[in-house]
Image (spheres, rainbow, N blue to C red):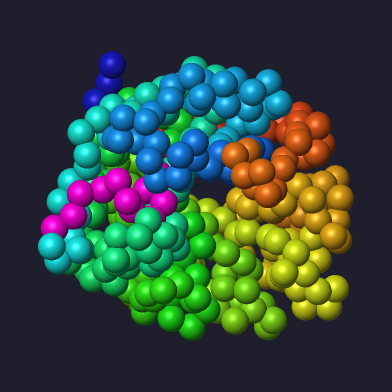
Amino acid sequence: ATTRGSSAVRSFQNTPYLSAMRVAATLACAAAAAFPKMAGLNIPWNQFGNDLGTGNFDADWFDKYFATAASNYQNIARFWVHCDGRALQYGSDGSVTGLPSGFTTDLASLVSIAQKHQVVVQLCLWSFDMCKDDSGVGHTHAAVAASEVASKSYVDNALKPMLEAVKQYPNVIVEAVNEPEWCMKGPGNTQDQVDPAAMQRFVAMISEAAHAEGRKTTVGSASLKWSSHASESESCFWDDAALSKAYPSPSGSLDFYNIHYYDWMYNADWGYDPVRANTSHWQLDKPTVVAELPASSQHYSVDQMLKGATGNGFEGFMFWAYNDQKFPVDSALGPMGSWAQEQKASYESVLTWLRGQDEIVV
């Protein structure tokens, strides 16, 4: 071994041979950490909002799901954690005081089962359903996003314990909110709605906490209508500039984008459609996955959606949904399996990206 200040070592490190080795090693590491192709389904739950910490966790049900997913060449699955927030514990002011007993154990079991079958789990923490009272309790949980104090209570008393519970598992991505736009003033249509800046802050606070534990993050935007700077889009709520303005944190941004597509977005001239126009047109500055789309469309076959959006630069697909009879996915399984094999959409490729890129110094 030699000291870092050795002139002999410095001289050797400056030789063309070693410089070439350093460049090659760095390039190899960069290639290994390239964004992976993602192929999967939305599970999205067995029992809406009641899978974890309620005594209802069904390990056999999830084992069957993940085994089937792996056999169909799927490397990712999207699971909704809180949904509308019905299983969390709250104070009288709407702040989150904790998780129910058994919640973190159930969550760890879920991720462990997925790991056994070599599937990455995208944990979608919340949905716009947080702004609805579908469970009939007389109020919503919109305050968790609307109030910075309540947001922090969620991060401290629920999210951080959840991240701690799964810290040994590499196969986790954190998604802050599903289709938050429906819960926001402007585009929203829910019972309660929050200011866009408040939802952006909430998303950034979740991303900051997840990044502190080494997790990659995204948000499940309802449409390119609200996730693009293209002229036909209305807003770009989730890029770095927007999130930083709402919550100035060096680690509050997202690692990749999720957008959704359904036929209401279709228009041959201006539709918010990943098959119609490419990621450059949409001015997407991060890798983007179509994280919800139907297996049955009036405008495209499954093959047309897969090949068209891939040709346009989109990086993956999660069809909706395994456990929603209104949107059967059987017709998507074969084409997506073939696509996954052609695109080398492997479990290991996602793990490599999740581990990140470390600079190699020789």
Residue shown at the point (43%, 36%) measured from the top left: 172
Say which of 306 and 140 sits in front.
140
Q: Position of residue 193 (x, y in %)?
A: 39, 76
Does 170 appear in magenta?
Answer: no
Please identify the quarter of the rendering in which residue 233 is found: bottom right
User: From where the camera sits, is residue 117 visible?
Assistant: yes
Q: Position of residue 329 (x, y in %)?
A: 72, 40
Considering only vertical position in the picture, is 71 above or below 249?
above
Q: Position of residue 350 (x, y in %)?
A: 55, 34
Residue shown at the point (83%, 78%) measured from the top left: 269
User: From where the camera sits, is residue 145 visible?
Assistant: no
Considering only vertical position in the picture, is 305 above or below 37?
below
Read off the magenta span.
81-91
Residue shown at the point (23%, 71%) measured from the top left: 147
Please identify the quarter of the rendering in which residue 225 is found: bottom right
Does 87 appear in magenta?
Answer: yes
Please identify the quarter of the rendering in which residue 359 is found: top left
Say which of 17 and 85 sits in front.
85
Residue shown at the point (51%, 62%) measured from the top left: 179
Q: Position of residue 45 (x, y in %)?
A: 49, 40
Is residue 120 toward the left or the right of residue 137 in the image?
right
